[in-house]
Image (cartoon, rainbow, N blue to C red):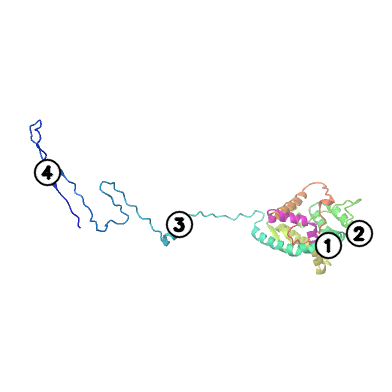
């Protein structure tokens, strides 16, 4: 059934009333009836989804908007926006110390040398200490130290340390004769009491103000500096150039280098282990080397006769190559 519109205007006649004060008669009162539009009972609802049906006399309620559907493209954009909004942290590589501008290269060399030490040098040194008795190892150490005395003497002369230069000559003479070619360190005992001292051409350059230059870590040498590397080269050339045989022959230099390296590794095992146990083994090795070298240079500027106890300096071979990376 369709929509029916009922419009009626009804005139309600009331019973005659008594005249009012004005004397007028009863009037007709017109009451309009509100027009109501009702949907047919069998008609389908024409309201759109999301709209609320409101009965007459009720407040109008706004329809609830449907939830937006998230597409895959929107999801990708959301993730991309999150990635773009994410905080980007840039960590700058710390600058190397001023004394070690080649630190990146030195660290790689240090790692290789330490690996070689663990695999080859340390086991060989352990076997060397077990096979060779301590007194024989000590004799070999004194022998090589005694051969280094002429170099110590020459550098003391260049540093104007005349007293120490002649003490070195006396030590070399006593040990070369009474000490059986230096195998026994007789000079350090009474009545001579001539202490063992180390000196080198690198010390002489430092004495005259030559700066150490960049720190280096080299295979077969270990920690050094440009100045010390030059000085070491000069020291090793003095005997072969001035004396000749046997110092310029492979059958002497190769065994001397091997024995000196193994002996050093045995004597300084605890010190090397302390470096490895530190938080930064490379930095610990570098700091120890630079500090000890600077102390030796500073000692050369001390005026007067400076007594050094024999036990204050090690009896290790003077300048062996150090594949384990420390001096």
Specify the segment rendered in magenta. Answer: 259-282
Q: Secondary structure at mark 3?
A: helix
Crowding near the residue tagged with mark 1, few <14, some 14–19, many ≥20 C-alpha atoms within 10 Å = few
Looking at the image, tell me whether mark 3 or mark 4 is earlier in sequence order: 4
Q: Nearer the viewer, residue 103 or 249?
A: 103
Q: Nearer the viewer, residue 53 or 127?
A: 53
Q: Residue at x 80, y 69 (%)?
A: 250
Q: Main secondary structure of the magenta part?
A: helix
Q: Secondary structure at mark 1?
A: helix
Residue 260 highlighted magenta (yes or no):
yes
Q: Secondary structure at mark 4?
A: strand
Horizontal side, residue 84 vs residue 211: left or right: left
Q: Disc 4 designates what residue?
A: 11
**In this rendering, which labeled residue sits more in front, label 1 or label 2?**
1
- Whole-angstrom CA distance, mark 1 to mark 3, is 68 Å
Quarter that holds the C terminus: bottom right
Residue 177 got which mark? 2
Quarter that holds the N terminus: bottom left
Q: Disc 3 designates what residue?
A: 81
Q: Disc 1 designates what residue?
A: 130
**In this rendering, which labeled residue sits more in front, label 4 or label 2?**
4
Q: x, y (%) of residue 249? A: 81, 68
Q: Residue at x 77, y 55 (%)?
A: 270
Asked whether the residues under the numbered discs 3 and 4 touch, taking CB atoms below 8 Å apart as contact, a structural biologist would say no
Looking at the image, tell me whether mark 1 or mark 2 is earlier in sequence order: 1
Horizontal side, residue 100 vs residue 15: left or right: right
Q: x, y (%) of residue 253? A: 80, 66
Q: x, y (%) of residue 143? A: 86, 60
Looking at the image, tell me whether mark 3 or mark 2 is earlier in sequence order: 3
């Amino acid at each position: 059934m369709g929509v029916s519109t009922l419009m009626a205007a009804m005139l309600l006649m009331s019973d005659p009333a008594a005249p009012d004060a004005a004397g007028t008669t009863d009037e007709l009162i017109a009451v309009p009836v509100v027009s109501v539009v009702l949907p047919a009972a069998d008609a389908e609802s024409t309201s759109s989804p999301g709209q609320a049906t409101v009965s007459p006399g009720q407040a109008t309620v706004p329809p609830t908007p449907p939830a937006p559907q998230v597409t895959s493209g929107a999801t990708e954009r959301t993730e991309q926006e999150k990635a773009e909004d994410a905080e980007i942290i840039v960590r700058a590589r710390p600058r190397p110390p001023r004394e070690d501008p080649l630190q990146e290269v030195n660290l790689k060399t240090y790692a290789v040398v330490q690996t070689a030490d663990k695999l080859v040098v340390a086991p060989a040194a352990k076997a060397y200490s077990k096979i060779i008795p301590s007194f024989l190892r000590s004799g070999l150490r004194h022998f090589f130290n005694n051969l280094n005395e002429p170099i110590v003497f020459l550098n003391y002369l260049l540093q104007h340390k005349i007293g120490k230069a002649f003490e070195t000559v006396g030590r070399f003479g006593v040990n070369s004769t009474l000490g059986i070619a230096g195998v026994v360190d007789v000079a350090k005992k009474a009545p001579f009491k001539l202490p063992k001292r180390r000196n080198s051409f690198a010390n002489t350059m430092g004495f005259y103000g030559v700066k150490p230059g960049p720190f280096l870590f080299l295979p077969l040498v270990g920690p050094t500096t440009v100045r010390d590397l030059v000085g070491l080269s000069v020291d090793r050339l003095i005997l072969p150039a001035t004396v000749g045989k046997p110092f310029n022959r492979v059958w002497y230099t190769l065994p001397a280098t091997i024995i000196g390296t193994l002996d050093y590794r045995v004597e300084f095992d605890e010190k090397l282990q302390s470096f490895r146990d530190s938080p930064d083994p490379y930095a610990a090795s570098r700091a120890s080397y630079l500090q000890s070298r600077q102390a030796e240079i500073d000692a050369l500027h001390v005026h007067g006769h400076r007594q050094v106890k024999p036990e204050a300096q090690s009896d290790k071979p003077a300048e062996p190559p150090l594949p384990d990376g420390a001096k």
